[in-house]
Amino acid sequence: MLVLSRQRDETIMIGDDIEITVVDIRGDKVRLGITAPTRIAVHRKEVYEAIKAENHRASQITGTDFSQLPSPGPMKRPRTAGSIPSARINPAPNGQIRPGQNQPPHSSQQHPPFPDAKSA
């Protein structure tokens, strides 16, 4: 094992693609920043070990042994273009939009002019 000493904001290079920077040191904790290509997975060791164990368990499941798989939960019908609910616009009798309702796509009301830069 190579042991290096680094101070805050100092970097270690691994090959040409991986940089490890000491971001912060607080007591007995060191925060590291890691820059690596997306093709290289970077995990804490305990997460890496859990992924490895789960992959091993998954490789042991036979073609018909689905009892070990987690339940996917209730099935939802996929939405199609025709099943997306449209916004309802319910104007008040005077044509004004009631508070809390969607604005109509084409309002016939005139918008006030933008304020002058001098008056702002």
Image (tube, rainbow, N blue to C red):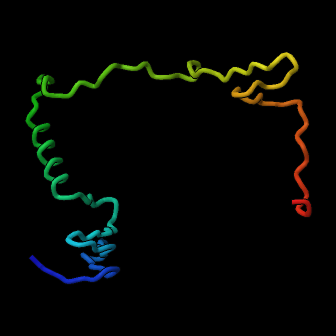
Q: Residue 2 appears at what percent x and percent y?
A: 12, 79
Query: In which quadrant is the C terminus drawn?
Result: bottom right
Q: Is residue 111 left or right of residue 50?
A: right
Residue 53: image quadrant is: top left
> Residue farthest to the front?
27
Which one is nearer the viewer's eye here, 7 or 36?
Answer: 7
Q: Residue 47 appears at what percent x and percent y?
A: 19, 52
Does residue 38 sit above or below 88 in this rendering?
Answer: below
Q: Is residue 50 left or right of residue 93?
A: left
Which one is nearer the viewer's eye here, 75 or 26?
Answer: 26
Q: Residue at x 16, y 54 (%)?
A: 46
Q: Is residue 111 left or right of residue 79?
A: right
Number of numbered discs on residues:
0
Q: Residue 86 appears at what percent x and percent y?
A: 64, 22
Residue 30: image quadrant is: bottom left
Query: In which quadrant is the N terminus drawn?
Result: bottom left
Residue 108: image quadrant is: top right
Which one is nearer the viewer's eye here, 110 or 55?
Answer: 110
